[in-house]
Every structure is written in C-alpha cells, then in structure tokens.
Amino acid sequence: MGVKKQRTDNVGINKASKGLTLMYKTTDYKPNQTGEKVMKKSIITVVAMLLVASMVLGACVQKVEPTPAPAAPTEAPAAVPTEAPAAAPTEAPVAAPTEAPVAEAKVLKIGQIGMMSGAMALYGQQQQRGFALGLEYASGGEKDAEGRWIIAGRPVEVIVKDDEGIPEKAVSLAQELIEKDGVELLQGPVSSASAIALTNVALENKMILMIDPAASSFTTGPNFNPYVFRTARTNFDDTLIIAKYLVENNGPEFAHIGVDNAFGKGSGIALAYSVGKFGGSVIADIYAPFDTTDFTPYIQQAMDSGAKNLFLTWSGTGYVTLFQQLGDLGALEKMTVATGFGDNASFAAVFGSALGSTGLNVYHYTAAKTEVNDWLVKRHLEEYKEYPDLFTAGGMSSAIALAEALKKTNGDASGDALIPALEGLMFEAPKGTFHIRPEDHVAEQPMNILKLVNLDPDLNKDGINEYAFFETVYVSKYDELGVPCTLTGDYASRCGDLPIIPAP
C-alpha cells in the first residue's frame, strides 16, 4: 500500500485483537517532552481488537437472564498494595477463616479455555503462558513434590482446553472440566462470544469465571452475574480517548465498521457512548461477517455516510485485507481511520509505511516500567526464548488476581467465598496497578499511548526478536478513564455513583 495522507500521520493496524487506550482526567492531552501535544492529526490507533469468534453473537450465544442481585454489598477486605475505593456491592457468604488453608494439600484445578488453534491461536498461547508465569510469580517459587506451584497452601493444576472460538464448544468444554476433571475455577477465553456463553456456566455452578483476554463489555454489563470477573480491559477503554481526540481535532461525525459478533457489537456501543460524551455522533454503524473477504460494500457505505472519521473493530487475518481495500477505494485519503497497535507479529504485515505514527495499546513490554513486568520479561525469555506479547500480561494478571483472592480465603476456591475477596481487590500486575470495581467487576487498569519508531523486529541482530518498535508517549493511571457501568435489569442498581450510559 502506498503512503496515503493518513499514513504519514498515524496508521495503527493490528492482526487480530488490539489493545489500546489512554486515560485522562482533564480535557487536554498530555504534552511530550518537547512540549508538543501528542497525537496530532493522524490515523490514530485505537480499537481494542480483542477476541472475536467466527459466529454472529445472536446465533452463538443465548442471552443470559439476569438473576436477582444480592440485596446488599459486601465489604471486600483491603487487598493488595494500594488503597481500594470503599464500595463493595455483593453480599455473599464468607467462609470463616481457619488456621490452616481450606482443604490443605488438595490440588486446586483451574480450567483454562482459549483459542489454542486457528486464526487467533497466538492469543491463546499468550494467555496460557502469561497465566502459567503468573502462578509461578504469585507462589513465590513454592512447589510441591510434583512440581506444581502452591497458592494459599494448595498445589495448582491448570487444564487447558481449545474452544476454537466457538461458544457452544466453550460451554461444552467448561461442563466437561467441571463434571469430569473437577475444576474449581475457570479462566479465559479469547473469544468474546465464548466469554458471554461461559457467564451462564459460572452462574449455574456458582463458580468464578475470570475473563482475559476477551474484551467485550457485555460480560460485565448485560450478561453480568456476581460470579463473573475480568482482568481484561473493555471496549470502552479502547474508544473513550480516541473519540475525544478525533471529535476535537477532526470532526464530530463517525462511521464504524465492526466484525459482526460480540466484540464488534460491544465496540459499537462503546464508540457511540464515547463519541457522544465529547459532542460527536456515529452516523453509520456497519457490521460485516467475520469471514468477509470483500469489504467493498461496507467501505463504500462508510464513505457515502459523509463521516470524516472511520473507526474499525476487527480481528484476525481479515484485518490486512480490510486495510488494503480501504486504500484501494480511496477511504484512507477521504477519511481519518482509527485502529490500534496490537501484537508484535502483525507489524511486518501491516505497518510498512506507518513509522512516526502514534497509537494506543493494551500492553507492550517496553512501555511497562514495573517490577512485576521486569520479572515477567526475564522469566519469559528464560522459559520461551522470546519476549512477552500483547496478552501475556493479561494472562499473568488473571493468575495474580485469583492468587491474591485465594490467599484471603485460605485456599477456599468456592464462588461465594471468592466474590468478596475479589471485589475491590487492588493488586500489582505487569502493566501496573489494577482495581477490580466491586460494583460491576470491571478491571480498571493502565493503558498506553505509543509512537512507532522502528519496524525491524531484531534491531540489535542478536538472533532474538526484541520488537523494540516504540517510544512510550504516555502510560495512564488505572483510574483515569471513567469506564461506564453497563449493568442492566436487577443488577442496574449496583452501578451506584459510577458513570452510566444514558437511556436512549
């Protein structure tokens, strides 16, 4: 693709799921060290292209009927290093602490579900590796005789299953893990549609489902139940800051092309909220099947809308085709296109003319300046002979969150014991401080703004790809963005004083 108008500014494209977000407290952008404002006109990158399934959400997942919310909030004990905000909504029975861990020496089995094959197998691998290293980190190096990491006095065994991004298969595998393998916790998946389907399983079995990397806000919104938690960011993390910049600098009208599934639809809702917050509107909300190879009619519809901004929510290898056809049809010259910096492997394929562009990102190991990240980078290199990637940190964050909660319950992994231990939890993860909101179980977390300065994966020619692609422009604090609470029905009252999406 030749260099277009936007290409000289900011073209952030990702292979399959992206992570991006910046946070803010004021209406001004943070200046860089030269005093210039970051994110001048360019194809800014944002769209958290997270996990997508290859099926339309309506065809794949039954809507979860909300169950009555517990009557009163439970005060979660103050968690890890930072002081957590006071609220704590779920009243769940708490097991009385014992001097010895509950069921001492009994192996704690965790079922991990993800896309370990297919178009997004890379993300499943990152999820799996990060979770394994997170357990090692949280254990402090303590193992049993069989080499299993010990958390809260219990050896931990992780049983990994491949759902191929199919919601029905995710549910079937989860049931098998519970009934046959005896797992007490579920973690994952990659696909947002699968994640929504698994919320039912968590509720029926009164078992904690810790979601990462699936990004759809539906799991902690319309499909919420008290047993569902996340360390994954939401679609709103991806859309709020980019909407602010584009409304103020390029125009108020947006078109959106999204994949027709849970992730894409969730992103569309988040985009409409975010754009509206800053005085803009989405005038064309367009969805295409995951297996689309000819995007012409969708791109043409976006161009015909008259919108100056085009926001993309896509994932998988189709992303490269989508961008090629945007160029062929002249959309990159007519509109400002927003998407995000994602996994390291995608850069060679799609970022050829994007040097100097500025974009948003969920995690890059070079941007996270934390002790936990230093440990992760070192161990990942030792164990896998490569650097951690986009969702490695998310897998590790899930493991740390579960471990911290288990320490509070003395190893009791039952859902009703872990709910109050997880609500309000603050802990240190590779990206920095995380806070699990007690109201809706959304994980507030840092996000990155990065500048692309290099496309050579092995810049120092040492035979190991260090992917030193970026200069860090800005890393937000965990609580800057103000992600809205999207609970509905009987759970809506849990939102309390959090920002909410206004009724239509």
Image (cartoon, rainbow, N blue to C red):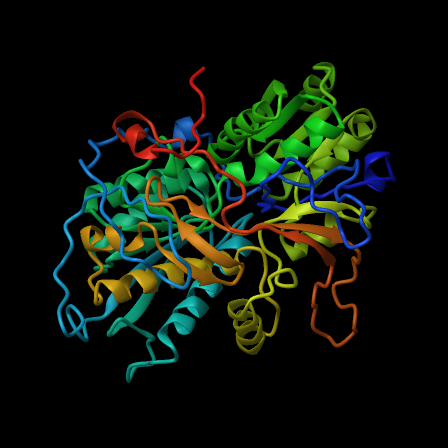
Q: Nearer the viewer, residue 293 or 2?
A: 2
Q: Quadrant of residue 332?
A: top right
Image-based side of 355 in relation to 309, left or right: right
Is 169 located above or below residue 245 in the figure?
below
Q: Position of residue 353 (x, y in %)?
A: 83, 46
Is 82 located above or below residue 341 in the figure?
below
Q: Position of residue 389 (x, y in %)?
A: 59, 60
Q: Nearer the viewer, residue 170 or 68?
A: 68
* Quadrant of the rendering where the N terminus is positioned: top right
Image point (64%, 39%), residue name: 318
Q: Is residue 449 visible?
A: yes
Image-based side of 76 in relation to 242, left or right: left
* Quadrant of the rendering where the C terminus is positioned: top left
Image point (79%, 35%), residue name: 41
Q: Nearer the viewer, residue 280 or 87?
A: 87
**Residue with the most extreme bottom position:** 145
Q: Is residue 294 visible?
A: no
Image-based side of 266 in relation to 90, left or right: right
Q: Position of residue 327 (x, y in %)?
A: 80, 32
Image point (19%, 75%), residue name: 105
Q: How many marks?
A: 0
Q: Quadrant of residue 2?
A: top right
Image-based side of 40 in relation to 187, left or right: right
Q: Position of residue 14 (x, y in %)?
A: 66, 45
Image point (33%, 81%), residue name: 143
